[in-house]
Amino acid sequence: MTVFHQGSQKTITGHKALREALRDTQTYSSDLQGDADVRDYRQLPLEVDPPRHHLYRSALAPYFVRPTIERHIPSFQLNSKKLIDEYFEGQPKEVVSELALPLVMENLGAIYNRPQDVAEWISWGPDVWTAESEKRSGAVLHRYLDRIYEEALARTSDDVWREIAHLEIEGKQITALEFRGIAGVLLAGGRDTVVKLLSGIMWHFAKFPQDLEYLRKNPTSLSSAIQEFLRFLTPLPQMNRTTVPETGADELPADRFVGMSFISGNFDQTVFENPFVIDLNRPRNPHLSFGFGPHTCLGNHIAEVEAKVFLETLLSSSFAWRIHKEEIRYHAAPYERVPDHFLSLQLVRA
Ligand code: HEM
């Protein structure tokens, strides 16, 4: 999920300061609306504070618990195997658009029981706001959300949208706008973030094939490797908070935004030794890639299970690969070794 906010003048950095600030929802509120150029409703439960935040979060939690996600492992395995095999066939291809994005969308189609929508989600590209043209617009997403909402209300479907359209918050069925806010984030949250994670994993193994070989021989290091990829790649590097909750405020000062720099926490030398090295056996890894506090990522198990199946499929294959073409936009210093965006990444068998 990339939520566009006006720039923040203040940024909280460092692992300890971030954890404190992310817990302190009174001072650093999530009562703010991002992407104001393309939507006029809140993403939920992301852009609301406790106690109301808790109501949305607990209503959605059952869809995201680990056992629910693990039921889909057989589908994730089939999707990973098929797409990895196809990726290494024929001409060099883009990792983002021809491997990671289709895989993440196929997996989401299984979780949400909406396989019929997968081709449409893929056609939006990695960022739904620029699905139709380079100019950001909410039209494509909102047409889709309105359509599935109508369907869901008519109870013609048996899937996550139908259940969400009928969710009750404090005894009242959610409104069309609340549905947009929830369904929008369920589609956006697990899209570019997981795509960046999987692309980053492929990129790392192209640069350090010895790490792929190491994991093939030491599969027990898989879980710590996933946490380390999550830390290093920090797919969602920063989110904003506001010092003035926006709901009902008379005045909204332009300097109300405060950035929460998850990436700074992940490279905090007081917590992570040699943070710029990807250490697949890092003994302790309290990374902040999923945030911290009440808004901690709800989809963390989806991301972890998807990444685990993807890695297991790579390890059990005989593929080794090298970079054919790469064009990467890196973060600004001091994170200039950390990819921010894979503009182009093409890999071929080594
Ligand atoms: C590697 C993958 C992912 C990363 C790095 C990531 C990162 C994050 C972060 C940092 C937050 C906290 C935002 C804040 O504090 O303002 C968050 C929240 C959230 N994420 Fe993820 N996310 C990932 C995957 C997913 C997936 C797969 C889904 C679901 C399909 C998802 C759904 C959500 C939702 C619904 C929230 C809002 C939680 C709340 O406000 O209570 N995320 N994510």
Image (cartoon, rainbow, N blue to C red):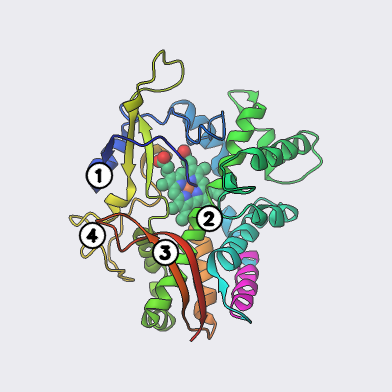
Give SS at disc 4. Answer: loop
Which of the two discs, 4 and 1, sits closer to the camera?
1
- For ligand 1, tell me if the residue under mark 4 lies within 8 Å: no
Amino acid at pointer 2: Ile
Q: CA distance from mark 3 to mark 1?
A: 25 Å
Amino acid at pointer 4: Phe
Relative horizontal placement of residue 49, taking residue 137 as reference (left or right): left
Marks 3,4: beta carbons within 8 A? no
Looking at the image, which residue is at 59% across and 79% down?
88
Q: Earlier in the sequence, mark 4 or mark 2?
A: 4
Up/down of 245 relative to 231, above or below: above
Give SS at disc 1. Answer: loop
Give SS at disc 2. Answer: helix
**Span colored in magenta:** 75-88
Amino acid at pointer 3: Ile
Q: CA distance from mark 4 to mark 1?
A: 14 Å
Marks 2,3: beta carbons within 8 A? no
Q: Earlier in the sequence, mark 3 or mark 1?
A: 1
Q: Which mark is residue 13?
A: 1
Look at mark 2 in the image and give the residue it sits on.
302
Amino acid at pointer 1: Thr
Give SS at disc 3. Answer: strand
Q: Earlier in the sequence, mark 3 or mark 4?
A: 4
Which of the two discs, 2 and 1, sits closer to the camera?
1
Q: CA distance from mark 2 to mark 3?
A: 26 Å
Look at mark 3 in the image and give the residue it sits on.
328
- For ligand 1, tell me if the residue under mark 2 lies within 8 Å: yes
Q: CA distance from mark 4 to mark 2?
A: 25 Å
Look at mark 4 in the image and give the residue it sits on.
272
